[in-house]
Structures are given as C-alpha cells and as structure tokens.
Image (cartoon, coloured by chain):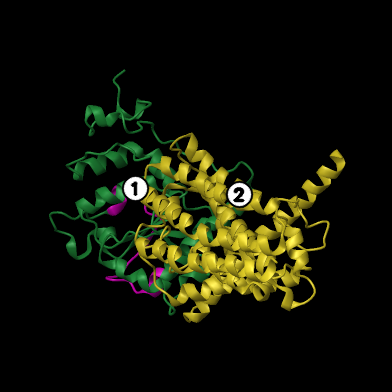
Amino acid sequence: MKKTPSTLSTLENAGLSAEDQLLFSNARPRPYEPYPIKAIEDFANWARANSLWILAFGTGCCSIELRPLMTARFDASRFGVAGRPTPRQSSVFIIGGYVSVKTLKRIVRSYEQMQGPKFIIALGSCPANGGMYFDSYNTINQFDLYLPVDLYVTGCMPRPEALLGAILELQDDIKAGKCDGANRYIEHFDEYKANQKKVIKDWNMPDYNW
Amino acid sequence: MIAEWFGRAGNFSLTLLIVTVYGLLVGAFIERTIAKVQGRIGIPYRQPFINILKTLVKRTAVSHGIMFYLGPVFRIAGGIGTLAFIPVIYGSETFANFSYAGDLFLVIYFMFFGQLGMALGAGESGHPYSAIGIARGLSQMTAYEVPFALAVISIVIQYDTLSITEIVAAQQGGWQHWTLFTNWVATLAAMLAFLGMTGYSPFDIFLAPQEIPIGPPTEFHSAYLSLLQTNRALFGATKLVLFMNLFFGGATGWIELMIKTLAIYMVAVVVGVAFPRFRVDQSIRFFFKIPTLIGIISIIYVQMMFTS
C-alpha cells in the first residue's frame, strides 16, 4: 500500500531542516471525544461559553473593532470576555478582516498552539469571500479552506455591536454543543494542510505546531 | 494524638476552602470596583470561578517537561503552606491552623517557596517572555523582601516572640494596641513592601501586560493555569491575613477579617490605579532606598522605645 499522508502515524515535517526536525514534535494531533456523561459536557460547555478569552492578535483592519469591546460603551467583560496575550491561554480567535498569505502562516501557527476546544470568529467580508481584496495577489479569498470557522460576521467593517452580537451567538452555539471546529480541523487535517501548503510557499515550520 | 491531627487537618481544609473562595470573591470585587471607576459594569462575581472551571475542563494540554508540571504544583504548595501556619481567626480553635511557636519564620520561608518553584517551571517552558518575567520577578522579590524582613525583625523585637498568635494576642484590647499605632515605622516599611508583593502598578513589572505579555505564566494553559489562578486568589488572601495579623491587630471573627483585609488590599489597589508602571531598575532602586531606610529606622525606633 502506498503511504499517503493520512496513513502515516507521525507527521513528516518536510519543511524543516534535518537538525530542526529533532527540535520539534512530529506527533499527529488526535480528535477529542466529549465527556461520556451529557450533563457534565453541558456543564463544561456552559463554563467554556461564559469564559471566552480572545487572542489579542489583530490580523487585519477589522481588528480595530475589537478594541471598543473592552471600553465603557460596550464592556464585553460582563459576558466573561477577556483579552489574552498568549495563544496558549486563549480560546477564541477573531480573524479581523483580510488575511494576507504572510499573516495566514502566523494565524495557522497561533491557532494550532491554542488549546482545544477553540473557536474562530471570522470578522468582516474579507475572510468570507475576499471582500474588496478579492483579486489581490497576496490575499486569500475563502478563509474556511484553511482553518475551520465557527461564525461569520459580515460587513465592511462590522460595527462593534455586530461583533458583540456574534460573541453572544457564539456563546449560545457553544452551550448547544455545536462549535466543534477544533475537532473538524483534526478530522480533515490533511485537506486543511494541503490547502495551507498550496498558498504558503515558504513552509519552514512543523506540520503541526504543538 | 492521631485523631487530633486529623481533626486539625480537617479544620485546615475548611479554612483553606473559605480563604480561597474569599480570595476569588475579593478579586472579583476589586475588578468590579475598578470597572465602576472606568464607567463599566465589570465582571460578574462568579467570573473567577468560571475561569478556573473552564481552564480545568480544557480538552488538550501540552507539556514542556517535568519541571513544567511541577511549577504550578510548587506554586500552590507555597500558597497552601503559607496559609497552613497562619492563625486566621484569633481565639478560635477551628481556624488556628497549624500555628506554633516559631511559625513566623516558616511563613516567610513559604512565601519564597512558591515563587522559586514557579521560576523553575516557567524557566522550562522555554518562552523568552517567561524568562524575562522570572528575572524581573525574582529581582523585585529580593528587593521588597529587604524592607519586609526588616519590618518583621522590628516587630519580633517589639513583641519578643516568633509566634504569630502571640503577636496577635499582644495587639488585643483596642485599636491603640495595633502595631500600626505602636510601631508605625515598621508598618510603613511593610506596607511599602506589600505594594511590591501584590504586583499592582507601579510594581507590576513581572507580569507587565502589553510589555512582556503576562510574563512567567505565558506558556501555562489548561489545568496548569487553573492551579495558578486558584493560587493567585489563595496566596493573595493569605498575604492579606498575614499583614492583618502582624500589623492590624488580627481578627476575632470573619466579618472583622473581611473588613480589615479589604482595607489593606485597597491600599495596593488605590496606588495601583493612580500610578503607571515603573521600569525594572526604578522599582528595584525604590525598594533599596526609601522602604529599606524606613525598615532600618524601625529597628532603631523599636530598640529605643521597647527595650530597656
């Protein structure tokens, strides 16, 4: 049988040099099952929904709509939303607007370093269909080919109210157990990776950033 | 004998639970107060509990090595150990914990212990911001421990004992007997050290949000982080109880404890919202200058006033 990437138990990490390969883990990520008892999973989902920590990574111009959320006018902290400067501790990634290929590489790295369950809100028109950058040479048009998106907020740019509404809707979805983007990413890992590698030409990082 | 020890351990578990919950609630209260000042509503009171729960039920976690596992464990062991030897309520058998004749020295040692464990754990995470945060945190700790130790030595000379229970006992019988009034120089030095201990502005150089994003715990996530969050509340409340015992006459009931500890905490908060962050060198120079000088004066003062 020919060895396709999906049948390998470890990742190839072909983008790394021989000595760098020793420094990085080549383990494949595995999908995670919810708790066997539904009441416990519901309780965990309630906690996850009421404590959304947003990764402070502004990827494009819509990120400017993120800042007012913490100010006196909108005050997202009353819904348990807080900013987190490190991907390790955050659970929500807000893709703020257009995604250039250079940024996509950093987004993939940061997203994979986040601990599951993790959620992505795509803000603005650009991650959905390219928006006003639809024919740009260095901007991707459809973000969910590269990473799983849980919620889209359209507009150019959306108002902070729209973003706040999206966060509340995300909370409802998490409580209902619908947001499983992290597992979707792992289950279709090879397709996502192939898409990412198609646009990111200088792939010099491990295949999964543990 | 064994039954008695089991009883004390049970009592201590109760104290631990109350102090942790109280620490989390105080944290939420302070957050809400700051939010009100800024014209916001602020987080709900249950938010710290949900945050701990959420980090605990995260589905994934990665490790960077054995010390990375042990860092948060040492941290919370430092917090629990500090509380274990502080009598929380004066005159209460239940809430006296494992207080004994020389507990003051042990408590001061335990306050170091958690920080050093955390330094090892964060060091192994390999993140450069962790290393910078640790370097800053430990150097600042060295600096503020000097005035704090001088203040403690001063009150040890004043009350001629190393037992926290006896120090509290000596302050009973009215507010004029508190160390705050009998030895205000030592209290001043200790309260300046307290500003550094709480890590609010201007002494938040080791967490330093927006500068070295949150410093030492940068790489800690999932259950590691929930341990650190629990310890943050527990250790914060424990330090308040210690300061209340040493300088503000202790407490004979939980209501008195809450009022006094909140008042002590407010000192750090008010200074925190009023001042911007120091640079590393400014912070350390500050502690080695004025508070250390006040600490030395407090020892001279206590020698002149209380020993014949």
Give the residue pinned by disc 1: B128
Identify the residue at the far front of this view.
B308
Q: Report the side of B6 relative to A160 (left or right).
A: right
Q: Nearer the viewer, residue A113 or B146?
A: B146
Q: Residues within 10 Å of mark 2 (few under 14, many from 20)?
A: many
Question: How many residues crowd around disc 1 within 10 Å: few (fewer than 14), some, or many (20 or more)?
Answer: some
Percent from the top left, x then y, of residue B33? 55, 76
Element carrying mark 2: helix
Residue appearing at x 78%, y 57% in the figure? B95
Residue A132 makes an appearance in the image: yes
Q: Are marks 2 and 1 in contact (CB under 8 Å)?
A: no
Determine which quarter of the picture holds residue A13.
Answer: top left
Q: Which residues are magenta?
A: A143-163
Residue A136, how many percent across, how many down? 14, 58
Position of residue B21 relative to residue B256, above or below, is: above
Three-letter code for the amino acid on which mark 1 is drawn = Pro
Residue at the top extreme, as displayed: A1
Q: Can you tell which chain is drawn green?
A: A
Question: Mark 2 or mark 1: which comes first in sequence?
Answer: 2
Q: Is residue B169 left or right of residue B289?
A: right
For the point 34% across and 38% down, the residue is A208
Q: Residue at x 43, y 66 (%)?
A: B289
Rendering quarter of residue B300: bottom right
- Residue beneath label 2, please? B110
| Colour of chain B as rendered | yellow
Q: Cα distance, mark 2 to mark 1?
A: 27 Å
Q: Can you give x and y, in whole percent of width and height, for residue B279 in the image?
A: 35, 64
